[in-house]
Amino acid sequence: MSTASANVNIMIKAARRAARGLLRDFGEVEQLQVSSKGPGDFVSRADLKAEQVLRDELMEARPNYGWLGEESGAEVKGADPTRRWIVDPLDGTTNFLHGLPHWAVSIALEHKGEIVAAVVYDPAKDEMFVAEKGSGAWVNDRRIRVSGRRDMLEMIFATGIPFGGNPELPRTLRAIAALTPRTAGIRRWGAAALDLAYVAAGRLDGYWERGLSPWDTAAGLLLVREAGGFAGAIGEDEHVFDDRSVVAANPNVYETLRGILQGA
């Protein structure tokens, strides 16, 4: 993205700095089984360190903005009430814990309730997905677009499958059962931010998931929309953050996919 704004450049710099620490920690994952400390503690520390790096970088550059991060949880109001950072320092924690190189740093900037800038960085593959309202979506300075497929039998979709005991599991399984016979396949990658980035890049034709938080979806929503796709809540007339769900797809299949999910 050759003409990125100052805010986007700040976001890219912060994501890269946080990623350096995460990559070091990721290199130690294979030692977890012989560690005296639990793997959950290890990943929590990695999460917390990365979020602190992001918070230091972003809030130093824009001290008046608000803040909403996964690890810190509670929203912090800024002196400028119209802007806030929405951050997930490690999206794909379970993948990270198991040594799977599919996780990301996700940063979004919200202005007056609308996402206006987004960065999703995949350190393991060194892919930097960037979008800014009105400026399109990019990966490593290459413009990306959603897929142009029209026939669902040629399309692949992604979702998140809840863990056992999660109340969303039965509904998700019903949706998979309804959708699978009509598609070329369904994937479960385990990182919502990257699922949305992959829809934006045309690698996936669509994605849906329920039970999500704002930091899971904020950056990805803008990536999809700036890449020419549609993204919204599964529920009727609901905002993504309020409904805690997301459906994203190329324009040819968005309404069909959303209808199937609502029916399930």
Image (cartoon, rainbow, N blue to C red):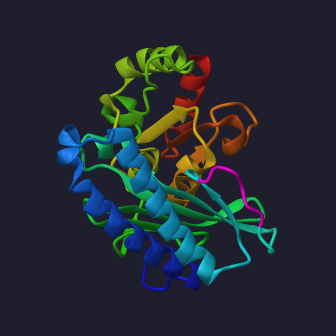
Q: Is residue 76 magenta?
A: yes
Instruction: Judge by depth and name the residue closer to the eye, 259 or 21.
Output: 21
Q: Image quadrant of residue 176?
A: top left
Tell me which secondary structure the magenta stretch mostly adopts. Answer: loop
Residue at the far front in the pictured view = 36
Instruction: Judge by depth and name the residue closer to the eye, 253 or 97.
Output: 97
The N terminus, quarter of image: bottom left
Relative side of 88 to 128, left or right: right
Residue at the image position 77 percent from the left and 70 percent from the top: 78
Q: Is residue 92 visible?
A: no
**Residue 3, relative to residue 176: is it above or below?**
below
Instruction: Judge by depth and name the residue closer to the eye, 89 or 144.
Output: 89
Q: Position of residue 44 (x, y in %)?
A: 43, 48
Residue at the image position 39 percent from the left and 35 percent from the top: 157
Q: Position of residue 75 (x, y in %)?
A: 72, 55
Q: Position of residue 144 (x, y in %)?
A: 39, 63
Q: Which region of the structure is painted magenta?
A: 72-77
